[in-house]
Amino acid sequence: MKITLQVWRQANANDEGRFETYHQGGVNEEMSFLEMLDVLNESLINEGKEPVAFESDCREGICGACGMVISGSPHGPKKAITTCQLHMRSFSDGEEIWLEPWRAKAFPVVKDLVVDRSSLDRIVESGGFISVRTGSAPDANAIAVPKSNADRAFDAAACIGCGACVAACPNASAMLFTSAKVAHLGLLPQGQPERFSRAVSMVATMDQQGFGYCTNHGACQTACPKEISIDLIAMLNRDLAIGALSGA
């Protein structure tokens, strides 16, 4: 395969940035998208040019580090996968592909396709934990949890914090991420004592970090590689209202 890559190059957060064009041949359709970028960077290094900076770690769809916007879609054209799980067979020979970083005020560009997503960590630090002493690990099934709650908590905990929901949202809102981190604790018995104060604290931190407001556009759900539902946002809004009224 031969492809044309339009890649966003930006030295740092203060640089204006620009797209650069690369014509890449010898692309095997069985390559992952990141393997294709590795090949591109080998070519650039051999030509004495600066390689394209992009982030990755597990390359198994678990860590969420590999996120980038591919031809207008976070993580690319396929649903329910991360960039590292995308393969070049999803593209056509001769296709032009545009690569950009996540676009959000709360995600300043570090370099090229790499952004600083530590704002998501700060949301979790503000309340995404259980501080009540629970003692030693209880025996299995000692605490009764309704299956519907256990299933929803498991679905929420599947969030890998990649930031695709933010990149897809026209308001750059992190409500889907925040609702997932609130819900996977708030649906379980251990998370009840701090349930409402957790929602208030994490949403307040989300606002402080520069994320936008949710207007139920729904793009976050579509872009999420773990297919987390916006139903969790409704649950977060209920907890937030209760917390605000109770002064949590």
Image: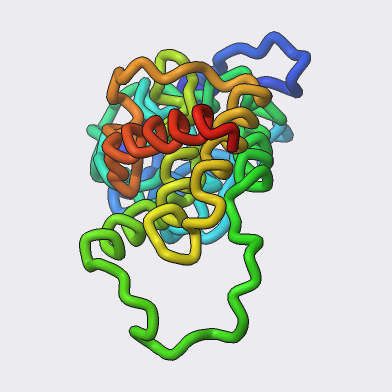
Nearest to the observer: residue 78 or residue 119: 119
Q: Which residue is drawn at 41% across and 49% down?
A: 183
Residue 188, how many percent across, how many down?
Answer: 40, 62
Nearest to the observer: residue 232 or residue 28: 232
Quadrant of the frame with the C terminus: top right
Residue 127, how many percent across, how many down?
Answer: 62, 47
Instruction: Please say whether residue 222 is visible from this viewpoint.
Output: yes
Nearest to the observer: residue 8 or residue 214: 214
Q: Which residue is drawn at 29% across and 27% down?
A: 94
Residue at the extreme top: 16
Residue 213, how many percent across, how many down?
Answer: 47, 17
Q: Residue at x 25, y 39 (%)?
A: 78
Quadrant of the frame with the N terminus: top left
Q: Left or right: where does residue 83 sit relative to residue 115?
A: left
Q: Residue at x 32, y 33 (%)?
A: 234
Q: Left or right: where does residue 110 sit relative to residue 155?
A: right
Q: For residue 53, which quarter of the picture?
A: top right
Residue 44, how many percent across, how many down?
Answer: 63, 36
Nearest to the observer: residue 209 or residue 88: 209
Instruction: Please say whether residue 158 is visible from this viewpoint.
Output: no
Instruction: Name the colour scheme.
Output: rainbow
